[in-house]
Image (cartoon, rainbow, N blue to C red):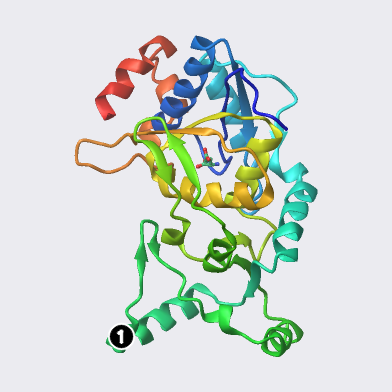
Amino acid sequence: MTQSAKIITRFAPSPSGDLHLGHAYSAKLSYDFSVQKGGDFILRIEDIDHLRCKAEHEKSILTDLRWLDLKWPTPIRRQSNHFTDYKAALDKLESMELLYPCFCTRRDIINEIEESTRAPHMRPKFGPEGIIYPGTCRHLTTEEQQQKVDDGIPHALRFNTNKALGLLKAPLYWTDCKTGEQKATPELLGDVILARKDFPASYHLCVVVDDHIQMINHVIRGQDLYYASHFHRLLQHLLKLNTPIYDHHPLLATRDGNRLAKRDKSITIKSIRESGIGPDQIDELIKEYL
Ligand code: GLU
């Protein structure tokens, strides 16, 4: 598939709560950019996490976005309808022997890290998204893996990042609108989970598959996903998917420096809407948190 010359942006919320002002900022940046460029704006619902995503949240997200005067083509792609696409991508990575089952619980990982801090030569590594998975299950033999499966221990699928990097003939690059061409450094995230224990995919996998299928060529999203873009570039290369241009915007924060979060009820779009503020005042409000 060739990259379309027409700008195609997207907003891809997870319906796990109400949208807040930070989401409105992100959605409006994408929408306004597509309008300014005569392009398309797509809304995608990222609802693979059936434990956290709810129909009522999706409904209120759509109401909020309509109130913000955003328009998008229908039908909307909902990730929960497309597990076969993600499975095909996983199978491809599996056939390259880049996935391994990980049986660790959060507790196991913490224990492993506590253990390693006692041995100074094995200090845990910290990446931009926190502690890097220490690789416990990467070293299991096929027999050990099978034993754990037979014992009924649930597992996720992790991506062997260093092994994948070893397959590259040359470094990979991607473009960030603000900082220019970036050399991809996915090793900073370590061995990322691509299929979770409770559902057979993960954000990192689905997002690259969907952006490709929907021909998104300009991704505007929060600065918190900057390092994810390094990892996404590697997946795009291995899966032969298109790489969009990325623009990472600053995150909104309160005066005391805290990021806006879904739990802050006061700045949800719903509460703003219900307080009598108009959609034309949103840009002013956003500036107070930038
Ligand atoms: N569903 C993701 C989120 O809500 C979207 C991230 C992205 O734009 O890539 O954070």
Query: Which residue occupies the foreground of this view, 172 or 289?
Result: 172
Asked whether residue 52 is in view, the answer is: no
Q: Is residue 169 visible?
A: yes
Identify the image quadrant of residue 15: top right
Check the image and report above or below for 47 versus 65.
below
Across and down, in percent, residue 123 comes to: 32, 79
The residue most toward the right is 84
Relative vertical location of residue 214 with respect to residue 274 in this rendering, above or below? below
Amino acid tagged 1: His
Q: Is residue 25 left or right of residue 243?
A: left
Q: Residue at x 47, y 56 (%)?
A: 186
Q: Which residue is mark 1?
A: 121
Q: Which residue extends farthest front?
A: 169
- Residue found at x 50% / y 76%: 135
Count every numbered label the image shows and give the total: 1
Quadrant holding the N terminus: top right
In the displayed structure, does residue 25 sit left or right of residue 288? Answer: right
Residue 121 vs residue 109, the one in the foreground: 121
Quarter of the image with the C terminus in it: top left
| x and y, in percent, of residue 174 in the image | 48, 40
Where is residue 196 drawn, in percent x and y? 63, 62
Q: Residue furthest left?
A: 256
Judge whether 105 appears above or below 192 on screen. Answer: below
Q: Nearer the viewer, residue 24 or 219?
A: 219
Residue 252, quarter of picture: top left
Q: Residue 198 at what x, y percent from top left?
A: 66, 63
Disc 1 beta carbon < 8 A from ligand 1? no
Q: 10 Å neighbourhood of mark 1: few (<14), some, or many (≥20)? A: few
- The answer to whether residue 76 is above or below residue 16 is above
Q: Callout 1: helix, strand or loop?
A: helix
Name the foreground residue: 59 vs 120. 120
